[in-house]
């Protein structure tokens, strides 16, 4: 963001030079990236002079060119070939002489002597856009007849020198996205040494209603997207070129002047940070402004003459017949102000940041207005900005204010209330600043102390400081104004030495990563920000435990992930859509949880966990000339996941498994070790898979990495005598109803055989059309053992018969061959 030093000095009285101002702003967190000496027009109009066209004749060899002679005050008139349709003898014009450099953005070219279609040309008669004085290119600039020939153009147009401070604004400091915003921060710092320093806001006390001849009705239908809407009308205006002082202000920060009304709205935007929009009053059908959305697919042509298709979530400013403007983003071509406009409706609003951000990105329209709205503007600034702009329009464009101010503000945005303790200020800053100094800094920052006692105080933070809502934020404000460099380094280092051998997590992570890559897996890294809506109907990851962002960049990134599942599914969808359906992926990343029922304002209410996730989908072995392809199965994900536990020293005798309730996975197992949940694995539910447009089955495992490492480090090695009698393994393939879970089968098995059933595990799940509607197949392994004798075939067969009968009787299960 460019800040004009000359412009800044209008609002704050200081003798500091630009370098000193830059140093102060950087220390305040408004880092100045560069300081540049500039002229209000690039090149300073050097080489351009005022001339008079003496003769103007048709070019003999070109229908659209004229051959002129121009007096610029030198001994001989200059021959100049001109292509402008409005050139004529007797005009006073701007002439670029030979050797002059003209600029068009970052490009430039030098005027040279030339022959154009056989006629000599020793200069150029300029249009306003060719010398940076505007956007018009209908013809050359024609100046008043009393201008003296030979006057340097820089002198005539009053070109100013200025210093531009390029402030690298961070997203949380939108309050400083204006000259008054920067002046406000600068004053807070300077007041530490000079309490008389203050910000001089331009007065709007002269504002008054002249008549009520042009009332406009305003209706806000979408109050969620429009927090406040203010407006008024002005009639009898004359739209024309802006005066030099206004054009120079805008040119200094890189904005091209358009006309006096549009220039005023841009000026006020960069002055105080409040976006404005001026509508041609004659284009408001029914004299009714309606703030609402339009159906998806509605056509709308914007000021850049592009037809766009609207989305149902695009907030629009409409009249009774059609849309006039994309709210907070870009105007429409029909309602824009032009030289024929005589009546205005001036809008000053506060729109919801998420709505504007989504619309701006949806249409790839990034404007100065959308930049501010999508980061959060001050709802309490709309009336001031409206009055400021109205007074300037009356001054520069004439006219009368012809209506009352319409102000729709259904739910007033209150100051943020924050409790702060004195001891925490000293603890976090590392220095006792003294209560009086702290109070002075808060006062300089417009932060009011509501009440205080010996332990601390409560402050009211104005709404324009969207980034100051916690105790730590208030303390950071105190510190940045006091100055980070003013905190002395400690002369001693305090340290507590505790020896507690811990596993090398980095090494273990690399070990498991190498194991997985060796098994054909590829690592992915997904965004820890996700859609909070993913968790709305979950029981395993309740929506109430989602860490939601206070100021999200979009609704697609408005929460912190509780699980790695959704990032992996997004990656699978991305790859499948690009013809890569056979995937084995893994990710190690952090997940975030708000403790159930905890206070969102307290840091201790949040928990961060590291997890490892595996994803498998598609084929295990592709088809070739002598064998068909083999699909991945539940057994594959189970094998890879259990191998991770085994690699870290946790054996199958240490973990216990049980079925999981359907949620994001329709089938699966929960692994526990010493009552700690270690891992969940299973098959992603068909419903969730369809939501992500994934056709093939997805097998998923998620390991609580932190818990696993801790369990692995703390596991006790217990030696027991090996049984002298062998264990026996038997497998059953059961055809059962889809809604039956493994946990039910396990409970029936342990109830049926309490003595000799050592372990039961699910090693494969299969669903297919051949099984019948609503059916699935479970492949289950049973481990039988008698520690006192060898089991006989008769005993084993009896146990299996009893188990089979129990499954048939209680579940309606059938054995598959």
Image (spheres, rainbow, N blue to C red):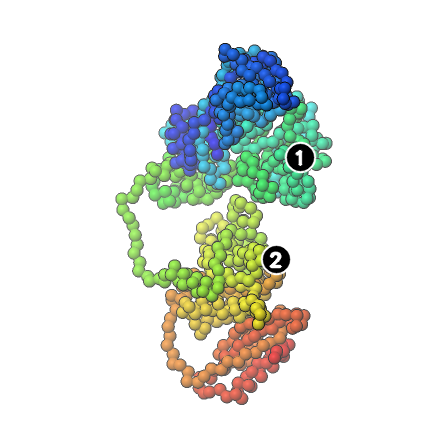
* Residue toward you, 1 or 663: 1
Point 56% across, 14% down: residue: 70
Viewer-nearest of discs 2 and 1: 2
Report whether residue 183 is seen.
no
Report whether residue 723 is seen.
yes
User: Residue 439 appears at what percent x and percent y?
Assistant: 40, 35
* Residue toward you, 185 or 151: 151
Distance from the alpha carbon under mark 2 to that under mark 1 = 37 Å
Q: Which residue is mark 2?
A: 693
Residue 156 lies, with reference to residue 771, above or below; the image says above
User: Residue 405 appears at what percent x and percent y?
Assistant: 63, 29
Point 46% across, 58% down: residue: 588
- In this view, the residue farthest toward the left is 491
Residue 453 lies, with reference to residue 559, above or below; the image says above
Q: Which residue is mark 1?
A: 324
**Which element is circle 1 on?**
strand
Q: With 805 as the anchor, is 463 left or right in this view?
A: left
**Which element is circle 2 on?**
loop
């Amino acid at each position: 963001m460019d800040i004009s030093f000359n412009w800044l000095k209008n609002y704050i009285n200081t003798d500091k030079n630009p370098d000193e101002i830059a140093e102060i702003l950087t220390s305040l967190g408004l880092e100045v990236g560069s300081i540049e000496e500039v002229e209000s027009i690039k090149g300073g109009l050097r080489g351009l002079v005022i001339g008079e066209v003496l003769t103007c004749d048709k070019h003999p060899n070109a229908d659209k060119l004229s051959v002129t002679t121009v007096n610029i005050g030198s001994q001989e008139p200059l021959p100049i070939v001109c292509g402008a349709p409005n050139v004529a003898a007797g005009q006073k014009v701007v002439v670029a002489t030979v050797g002059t450099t003209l600029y068009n953005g970052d490009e430039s070219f030098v005027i040279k002597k030339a022959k154009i279609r056989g006629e000599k040309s020793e200069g150029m008669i300029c249009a306003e856009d060719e010398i940076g004085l505007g956007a018009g290119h209908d013809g050359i600039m024609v100046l008043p007849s009393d201008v003296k020939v030979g006057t340097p153009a820089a002198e005539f147009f009053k070109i100013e020198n200025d210093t531009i401070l390029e402030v690298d604004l961070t997203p949380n400091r939108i309050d400083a996205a204006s000259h008054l915003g920067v002046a406000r921060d600068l004053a807070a710092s300077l007041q530490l040494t000079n309490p008389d320093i203050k910000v001089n806001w331009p007065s709007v006390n002269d504002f008054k209603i002249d008549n009520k001849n042009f009332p406009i009705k305003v209706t806000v239908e979408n109050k969620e997207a429009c927090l406040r809407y203010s407006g008024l009308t002005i009639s009898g205006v004359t739209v024309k070129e802006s005066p030099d002082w206004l054009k120079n202000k805008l040119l200094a920060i890189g904005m091209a002047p358009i006309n006096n009304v549009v220039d005023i709205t841009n000026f006020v935007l960069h002055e105080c940070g409040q976006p404005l929009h001026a509508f041609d009053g004659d284009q408001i059908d029914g004299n009714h402004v309606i703030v609402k959305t339009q159906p998806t697919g509605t056509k709308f042509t914007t000021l850049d003459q592009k037809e766009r298709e609207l989305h149902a979530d695009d907030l629009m400013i409409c009249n009774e017949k059609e849309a006039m403007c994309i709210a907070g983003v870009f105007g429409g071509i029909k309602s824009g102000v032009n030289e024929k406009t005589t009546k205005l409706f001036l809008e000053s609003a506060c729109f919801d940041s998420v709505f504007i951000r989504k619309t701006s990105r949806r249409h790839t329209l990034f404007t100065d207005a959308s930049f501010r709205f999508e980061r959060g503007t001050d709802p309490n600034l709309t009336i001031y900005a409206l009055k400021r702009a109205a007074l300037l329009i009356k001054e520069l464009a004439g006219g009368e204010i012809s209506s009352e101010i319409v102000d729709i503000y259904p739910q007033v945005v209150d100051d943020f209330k924050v409790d702060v303790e004195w001891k925490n200020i000293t603890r976090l800053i590392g220095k006792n600043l003294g209560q009086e100094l702290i109070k002075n800094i808060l006062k300089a920052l417009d932060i009011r102390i509501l009440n205080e006692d010996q332990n601390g105080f409560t402050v009211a933070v104005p709404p324009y400081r969207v980034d100051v809502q916690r105790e730590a934020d208030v303390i950071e404000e105190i510190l940045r104004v006091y100055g980070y460099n003013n905190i002395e380094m400690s002369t001693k280092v305090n340290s507590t030495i505790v020896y507690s051998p811990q596993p090398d997590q980095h090494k273990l992570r690399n070990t498991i990563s190498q194991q997985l890559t060796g098994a054909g897996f590829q690592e992915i890294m997904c965004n820890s920000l996700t859609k909070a809506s993913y968790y709305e109907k979950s029981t395993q990851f309740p929506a109430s435990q989602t860490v939601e962002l206070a100021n999200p960049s979009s609704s697609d990134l408005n929460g912190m992930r509780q699980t790695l599942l959704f990032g992996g599914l997004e990656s699978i969808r991305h790859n499948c859509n690009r013809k890569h359906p056979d995937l084995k992926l893994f990710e190690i990343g952090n997940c975030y949880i708000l403790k159930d029922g905890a206070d969102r304002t307290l840091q201790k209410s949040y928990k961060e966990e590291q997890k490892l996730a595996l994803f498998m989908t598609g084929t295990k072995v592709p088809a070739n000339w002598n064998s068909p392809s083999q699909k991945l199965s539940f057994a594959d994900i189970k094998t890879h996941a259990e191998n991770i536990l085994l690699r870290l020293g946790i054996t199958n005798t240490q973990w216990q498994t049980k079925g999981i309730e359907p949620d994001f996975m329709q089938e699966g197992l929960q692994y526990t070790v010493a009552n700690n949940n270690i891992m969940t694995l299973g098959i992603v539910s068909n419903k969730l898979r369809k939501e992500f447009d994934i056709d093939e089955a997805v097998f998923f495992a998620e390991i609580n990495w932190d818990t696993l490492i801790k369990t692995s480090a703390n596991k006790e090695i217990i030696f027991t005598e090996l049984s002298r009698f062998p264990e026996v393994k038997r497998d059953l393939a059961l055809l059962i109803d889809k809604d039956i879970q493994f946990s039910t089968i396990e409970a029936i098995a342990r109830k049926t055989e309490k003595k000799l059933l050592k372990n039961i595990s699910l090693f494969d799940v299969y669903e297919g059309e051949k099984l019948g509607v609503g059916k699935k197949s479970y492949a289950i392994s049973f481990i039988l053992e008698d520690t006192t004798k060898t089991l006989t075939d008769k005993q084993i067969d009896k146990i299996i018969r009893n188990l089979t009968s129990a499954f048939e009787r209680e579940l309606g299960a059938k054995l598959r061959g």
